């Protein structure tokens, strides 16, 4: 293979090109000068999206990664620049998003000395290691191609987020290097046949099977549907699992329905989900049997060990089990009838007890196309949408998973829209969380990213304040907000804005926003909402 003289920065950019990256989200700074010099020479094929804050570029990379399943790449300077990205990086960790963080470093010979270099941290690598599933640091320009190749191999194999630290002198130095090549995914871990046979036997014998599916089942949607239909088993999906079975499928249920049948299920198949939380909260009797599928065998040691533990790729394991059930006549008639009753009762109760939220959710359903991406912030309508808004496939409903990252939605939606310019992308924000990244409206205007932001305004951190009032004897403190005039705020950046005084007005405003060619903001004043938790996360 012919070698080429390159700088470390040029080697990074060559790896991006070889691995199909066509957008990089990043902020320049002195330690990254030689990376951005190389990026400047690649703008004929690479789009560089800058932002107004490092958290903005990291959240955009996250939205890109979550909505597509392909690498979302961001670059930031070390020290405070890197630290500003860590909320997004920890969220990527929570949802296993394929994010690649290119993190600057001080001069390689100064690392660990404690000399007070610009942007120096006592041990940046330790922080990086704690927030990623693989990390590396380049000590010489010759290290760069191998580290970048490994990073992309990890991402292709479903291991993310990952990070590469790049000292300033390494980016500047020249070396003879091989041409970059596209990284190949590691072969998926296949399930042992005897465990597949045992799992199938247990599921076939089950009278009331229940399936719980999470993001680790991505790619196995067809097999999941065949298993559910053969067994007549409801499939409970939550957060990252939404869309593995289309919401309209009669066996697709949420946590509200799942709680009602949990204790009656005799066999539970949990695939690609952490799972241990529900047995801890809802209980698990000695007679209930559990089959777990996860790529990480360490998961099986948390909580009660499953009867059958299959350490394998979720999609591969589902295909293998589906094959073992293929000879069965479908048992879905009784299961579908029972699930229909369960879903109808749950929907009716939610419609009554959470009527204020559901009016706004109805507006979303009415106005948005079926393939829209929704980024749900930690706000009342976000909670409800994450659980109840219909989705047709995975990666349409973006949530921060167990991290519960308040304020993530708007900047993340910009990344999702950047990666999916032909799709409608909507960020559901509260007036508290929106201002965490609302400065990135400048980024949306600068780069023509036509995401739709909705800010639901109640003048408080609403969920916190309701808990203060109802759970803590009215001890309301530090939860009231002073807001700008959000329409003027958006317009000051050059975005368009509209106010929606009612739920019906929200549907009309959404139709208006979808007709615009640039970024828009919808401002929706809302009342205090009743607590949704007993119904959507019982």
Image: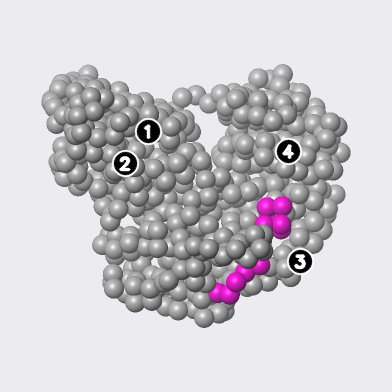
Secondary structure mostly taken by the magenta-highlighted segment of the chain? loop
In contact (CB < 8 Å): disc 4 and disc 3: no
Q: Which segment is the magenta one? A: 526-538
Position of 216 compared to 116: left or right?
right
* Secondary structure under the numbered disc 3 in the rendered image: helix
Q: Dot 4, how many residues are within 10 Å of its Cα: few (below 14), some (14-19), or many (20+)?
A: some
Q: Which mark is residue 279?
A: 4
Mark 1–mark 4 Cα distance, whole angstroms, equals 32 Å
Q: Tell which circle, 3 or 2, labels the residue nearer the N-terminal end.
A: 2
Q: Nearer the viewer, mark 4 or mark 3?
A: 4
Q: Which residue is mark 1?
A: 128
Compare marks 1 and 4 and give the one earlier in the sequence. 1
**Snapshot colouring:** one colour
Sequence-wise, which precedes: disc 4 or disc 3? 4
* Residue behind mark 2: 82
For the residues carrying marks 3 and 1, which lies nearer the camera in this image?
Answer: 1
Q: CA distance from mark 4 to mark 3?
A: 27 Å
**In the displayed structure image, the side of residue 490 where residue 211 appears, left or right:** right
Distance between the alpha carbons at the discs numbered 3 and 2: 47 Å
Q: Nearer the viewer, residue 34 or 458?
A: 458
Q: Mark 2 to mark 4: distance in Å? A: 37 Å
* Residue 75 percent coordinates (x, y): 28, 42
- Which residue is nearer to you in this view: 425 or 219? 425
Q: Is residue 399 visible?
A: yes
Whichever of labels 1 and 2 marks the residue nearer the N terminus, that label is 2
- Is residue 19 placed above or below 408 in the rendered structure? above
Q: Is residue 525 magenta?
A: no
Q: Position of residue 61 (x, y in %)?
A: 37, 47
Crowding at dot 3, Cα within 10 Å, few <14 / some 14-19 / many 20+, comes out as: few
Mark seen at residue 348 = 3
């Amino acid at each position: 293979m012919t070698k080429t003289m390159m700088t470390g920065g040029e080697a990074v950019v060559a790896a991006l090109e070889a691995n199909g990256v066509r957008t990089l989200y990043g902020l320049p700074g002195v330690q990254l000068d030689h990376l951005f010099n190389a990026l400047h020479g690649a703008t004929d094929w690479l789009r560089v999206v800058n932002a107004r804050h490092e958290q903005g570029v990291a959240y955009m990379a996250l939205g890109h990664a979550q909505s597509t399943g392909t690498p979302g790449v961001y670059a930031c300077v070390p020290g405070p620049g890197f630290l500003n990205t860590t909320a997004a990086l920890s969220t990527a960790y929570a949802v296993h998003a394929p994010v690649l963080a290119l993190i600057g470093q001080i001069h390689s010979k100064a690392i660990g000395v404690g000399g007070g270099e610009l942007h120096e941290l006592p041990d940046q690598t330790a922080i990086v290691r704690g927030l990623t599933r693989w990390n590396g640091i380049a000590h010489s320009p010759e290290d760069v191609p191998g580290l970048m190749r490994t990073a992309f191999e990890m991402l292709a194999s479903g291991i993310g987020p990952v990070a590469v630290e790049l000292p300033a002198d390494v980016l500047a130095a020249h070396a003879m290097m091989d041409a970059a090549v596209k990284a190949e995914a590691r072969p998926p871990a296949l399930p042992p046949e005897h465990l597949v046979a045992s799992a199938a036997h247990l599921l076939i014998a089950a009278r009331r099977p229940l399936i719980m599916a999470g993001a680790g089942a991505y790619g196995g949607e067809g097999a999941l549907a065949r298993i559910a239909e053969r067994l007549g088993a409801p499939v409970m999906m939550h957060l990252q699992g939404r869309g593995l079975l289309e919401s309209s499928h009669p066996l697709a249920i949420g946590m509200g329905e799942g709680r009602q049948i949990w204790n009656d299920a005799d066999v539970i198949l949990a695939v690609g989900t952490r799972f241990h939380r529900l047995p801890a909260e809802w209980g698990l009797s000695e007679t209930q049997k559990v089959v777990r599928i996860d790529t990480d065998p360490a998961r099986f040691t948390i909580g009660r060990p499953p009867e059958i533990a299959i350490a394998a790729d979720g999609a591969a394991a589902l295909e293998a089990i589906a094959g073992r059930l293929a000879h069965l006549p479908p048992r879905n008639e009784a299961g579908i009838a029972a699930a229909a009753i369960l879903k109808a009762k749950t929907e009716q109760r939610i419609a009554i007890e959470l009527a204020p939220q559901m009016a706004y959710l109805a507006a979303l359903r009415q106005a948005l196309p079926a393939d829209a991406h929704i980024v749900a912030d930690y706000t009342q309508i976000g909670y409800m949408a994450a659980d109840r808004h219909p989705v047709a496939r995975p990666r349409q409903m973006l949530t921060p998973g167990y991290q519960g990252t308040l304020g993530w939605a708007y900047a993340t939606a910009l990344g999702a829209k950047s990666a999916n310019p032909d799709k409608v992308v909507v960020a559901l924000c509260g007036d508290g969380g929106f201002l965490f990244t609302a400065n990135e409206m400048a980024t949306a205007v600068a780069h023509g990213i036509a995401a739709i932001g909705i800010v639901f305004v109640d003048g408080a951190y609403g969920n916190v304040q309701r808990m203060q009032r109802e759970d803590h004897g009215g001890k309301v403190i530090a939860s009231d907000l002073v807001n700008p005039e959000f329409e003027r705020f958006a317009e000051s950046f050059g975005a368009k804005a509209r106010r929606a005084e009612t739920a019906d007005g929200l549907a009309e405003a959404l139709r208006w926003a979808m007709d615009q060619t640039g970024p828009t903001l919808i401002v929706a004043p809302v009342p205090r909402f009743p607590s949704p938790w007993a119904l959507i996360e019982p």
